[in-house]
Amino acid sequence: MTPEVHISSHPLVHHKMALLRDPRTDPKKFRELLREVAGLIVYEATADLATEEVPVTTPLAQTKGRKLSERVGLVPILRAGLGMVEGIWNLMPNTEVWHIGLSRDEETLQPVEYYSRLPGGSTVDVCLILDPMLATGGSAVAAVDILKRWEARRIKFVGVLGAPEGVRRLTTAHPDVPIYLAAMDERLNENGYILPGLGDAGDRLFGTG
Ligand code: PRP
Ligand code: URA
């Protein structure tokens, strides 16, 4: 299986990413930009969702339209993934949202699971994992592991910034999970931060740190 990695080439995404990276962007603006970028990336990530024909009556005539025929679930990785939910909900208001709490240990860079609230069995056809940062890839791989144990049918990773190291780790561990990003950066620094990156996404989103 050839892994799919989609990096957006959309000018609006490029424009908003430059603002998102800028340290002068305050938390209020950061949240707004992250919501907007998430909406633009999910537009690309959902291009292959199945639809079915439905009858439509316009004010003038009968015609045919299409509606989504797959149930979509959003799975934000806490905390920073939360910043992507609203922008996607604006486009798909009926999606279920299930939370996974993972925190990266600052010394080992390994993900630590501290919260996972999923129903008994998978209730959706497509799961979109939301996390703006794909750094070492440890958190993303752990989230996919959790969803696969939950017997999720189709899983996609929807992020914002990726490092080559993280993309390689996720595609190696889970080649069946397509990755959608706004940008692919150069590398990780010695502390596991993406360079040039945007800093700590969770802290910038919530005004902490
Ligand atoms: C950040 C980010 C990812 C993870 C990426 O979260 O939101 O979840 O790091 O790093 P990785 O690819 O090396 O695993 P963090 O653990 O800092 O938690 P936070 O969102 O609560 O700030
Ligand atoms: N998590 C972040 O928030 N930023 C990085 O650059 C890497 C991991």
Image (tube, rainbow, N blue to C red):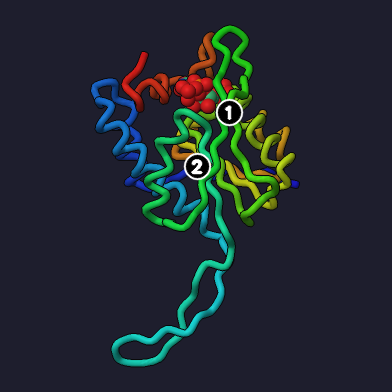
- Label 2 within 8 A of ligand 1 by Cβ: no
- Label 1 within 8 A of ligand 1 by Cβ: no
Instruction: From this view, report whether residue 106 is shown above or below residue 86.
Output: above
Tell me if mark 2 has few (under 14), some (14-19) or many (20+) residues whose alpha carbon lies within 10 angstroms of its own: some
**Nearer-the-camera pick, 5 or 29:** 29
186 horizontally vs 120: left or right: left
Tell me if mark 1 has few (under 14), some (14-19) or many (20+) residues whose alpha carbon lies within 10 angstroms of its own: few
Residue bearing the label numbered 1: 115
Q: Residue at x 69, y 45 (%)?
A: 120
Residue bearing the label numbered 2: 7
**Nearer-the-camera pick, 118 or 183:** 118
Q: Secondary structure at mark 2?
A: strand
Q: Residue at x 40, y 91 (%)?
A: 62
171 horizontally vs 101: left or right: right
Percent x, y for residue 16? 31, 38
Q: Separation of disc 2 and disc 1 at Cα?
A: 30 Å
**Nearer-the-camera pick, 206 or 198:** 206
Identify which amino acid the numbered label 2 is placed on.
Ile
Furthest residue in direction bottom, as rendered:
61
Percent x, y for residue 11? 34, 46
Could you say which quadrant of the image residue 196 lies in?
top left
Identify which amino acid the numbered label 1 is placed on.
Tyr
80 horizontally vs 171: left or right: left
Instruction: From this view, report whether residue 80 is shown above or below residue 209.
Output: below
Q: Earlier in the sequence, mark 2 or mark 1?
A: 2
Q: Residue at x 62, y 45 (%)?
A: 178
Q: Is residue 87 visible?
A: yes
Percent x, y for residue 155? 64, 47
Percent x, y for residue 66? 49, 75
- Quadrant, the C terminus: top left
Q: Is residue 186 visible?
A: no
Q: Secondary structure at mark 1?
A: strand
